[in-house]
Amino acid sequence: MEFPAFNVDPEKRGEIFREHCEVIRQAHRTRFAPIRWSDGELLSADLIPKPTTWEIPLFVTGHSRQSLDWIARESHGWINSPRPPKMQRLIVEDWREEVMKQCGAA
């Protein structure tokens, strides 16, 4: 695993993932705004080029140590390892149900 190589506690990877997703979004949406996170900060600098849309689509692979409701709320899609067809169908149905809840449609 890459976490020990960078002296990062692998048990914190879910928290780190969420935090870094937010940092990326802040960098896309702001210009020269100070951005601070647990392991760093971006001051007097900007990320360019900016996306031409509000945000660049984020696809979560696996669960990335996130709940299904977080994935449905915070991502634009979910890439999951294929499983037997019946199980895959249930996973996709759960995903769609969560997305509908987040949209207020369920």
Image (spheres, grey):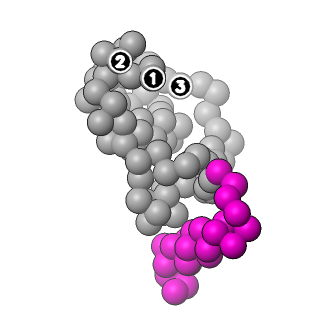
The kind of residue on which mark 1 rests is Met
The residue lying toward the viewer, choosing from 86 and 35, is 86
The kind of residue on which mark 2 rests is Pro
Checking the image for residue 4, the label placed there is 2
Mark 2 burial class by Cα count in 10 Å: few <14, some 14-19, many 20+: few
Residue 26, how many percent across, how many down? 44, 39
Checking the image for residue 47, the label placed there is 3
Is disc 3 in contact with disc 2, using a CB cutoff of under 8 Å?
A: no
Determine which quarter of the picture holds residue 4.
top left
Residue 98, how many percent across, how many down? 51, 73
| Residue visible at 41% across and 59% down in the picture | 67
Q: Is residue 88 magenta?
A: yes
Q: Is residue 7 magenta?
A: no
Relative to 91, say whether 7 is above or below: above
**Does label 3 or label 1 sit earlier along the sequence?**
1
Mark 3 element type: loop
Q: Which residue is mark 1?
A: 1
Is disc 2 in contact with disc 1, using a CB cutoff of under 8 Å?
A: yes
User: Marks 3 and 2, how far apart in space?
Assistant: 28 Å
Query: Which residues are the magenta region?
Result: 81-106
User: Marks 3 and 1, how far apart in space?
Assistant: 29 Å
The residue lying toward the viewer, choosing from 77 and 79, is 79
Q: Residue furthest bottom?
A: 106
The kind of residue on which mark 3 rests is Leu
Mark 2 element type: helix
| Residue visible at 59% across and 25% down in the picture | 48
